[in-house]
Image (cartoon, rainbow, N blue to C red):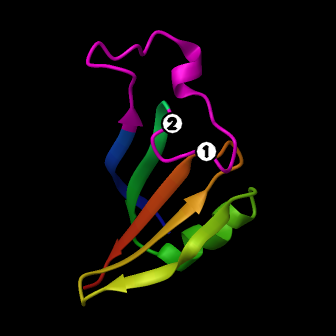
């Protein structure tokens, strides 16, 4: 049950100057924060055992957002919300 790679990150910024020097831009937001709230909104990882990773993350306080889905015969995908409110996407490529 290993992470293969970080796939992508969604960071919402106030303007094109990207104010990353402000600590509030990278802190977690309340669980019901809008999708366009400033800061790190989502990070996605490719994993080799998505169900095992979900189980481990739940043990650390993460909650599944929606359900584990299948995208054609290519991927199994899901989102979990960590304790700080950051969305973590997981993708397992089907072989």
Q: Image point 25% across, 85% down: which residue?
A: 95
Question: Which residue is disc 2 drawn over?
Answer: 37
What type of secondary structure mainly makes up the magenta span? loop
9, above or below 7, in the image: above
Q: Image point 54% across, 46% down: which residue?
A: 34
In the rendered structure, does residue 75 fall within the stretch colored magenta?
no
26, above or below 58, in the image: above
- Find residue 69 and report its image quarter: bottom left
Q: Tag 2's secondary structure?
A: loop
Q: Residue furthest bottom?
A: 73
Which circle marks residue 33 in the picture? 1
22 relative position to 44: left or right: right
Which residues make up the magenta segment? Answer: 11-37
Badge 2: few (under 14), some or many (20 or more) residues near its Cα, within 10 Å? some
28, above or below 33, in the image: above
Q: Measure the C-alpha gap from mark 2 to mark 1.
A: 6 Å
67, above or below 54, in the image: below
Q: Image point 34% across, 17% down: which residue?
A: 18
Q: Residue furthest top?
A: 21
Q: Tag 1's secondary structure?
A: loop
**Residue 41 pos. (x, y %):** 48, 43
Badge 1: few (under 14), some or many (20 or more) residues near its Cα, within 10 Å? few
Which circle marks residue 70 in the picture? none
Q: Is the residue under label 1 in contact with that under label 2 (CB below 8 Å)?
A: yes
């Amino acid at each position: 049950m290993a992470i293969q790679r970080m796939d992508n990150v969604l960071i919402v910024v106030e303007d094109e100057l990207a104010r990353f020097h402000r600590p509030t831009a990278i802190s977690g937001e309340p669980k019901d924060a809008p999708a366009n709230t400033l800061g790190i909104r989502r990070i996605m990882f490719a994993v080799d055992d998505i169900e095992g990773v979900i189980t481990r993350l739940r043990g650390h306080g993460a909650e599944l957002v929606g359900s584990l889905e299948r995208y054609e015969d290519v991927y199994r995908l899901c989102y979990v919300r960590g304790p700080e409110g950051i969305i973590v996407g997981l993708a397992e490529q089907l072989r």
